[in-house]
Amino acid sequence: MIVEDFTSLQRGFEDPLEGRVETCPRCGRNGIEEHPQCGDPYFLHIQASSVLSDGMICEPIDRCELRPN
């Protein structure tokens, strides 16, 4: 299992798999804005990834929901 903490990265850092690190508009911590196809957008702060026999699973551990106005 791998834990990725985007709050410890500097704003503007480009993660090749996740995207650009920015400041969360809700809590002010660093993270990556996510726009899933099935669900509301959120700001990802900490994520856990595990490699399984049939692929990889990534689960958010800490995130802020970004509800549209």
Image (cartoon, grey):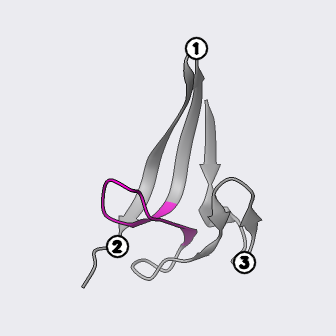
Question: Which circle's residue, 2 or 3, is located before the other in the chain?
Answer: 3
> x%, y% of residue 21?
65, 71
Label 3: which secondary element: loop
| Residue on which the image places disc 3 | 12
Q: Residue at x 63, y 49 (%)?
A: 4
> x%, y% of residue 65?
33, 67
Indicate which label's residue lies in the foreground, 1 or 2: 1
Question: Does residue 36 belong to the magenta stretch?
Answer: yes
Kind of residue at badge 3: Gly
| Residue on which the image places disc 2 | 66
Residue 49 vertical placement versus 13 (above, below) = above
| Residue on which the image places disc 1 | 53
Alpha-carbon neighbours of circle 1 within 10 Å: few (<14), some, or many (≥20)? few
> x%, y% of residue 25?
44, 83
Residue 32 vertical placement versus 25 (above, below) = above
User: Which residue range is magenta in the image?
Assistant: 30-44
Q: Residue at x 45, y 48 (%)?
A: 60
Alpha-carbon neighbours of circle 3 within 10 Å: few (<14), some, or many (≥20)? few
> x%, y% of residue 28?
49, 80
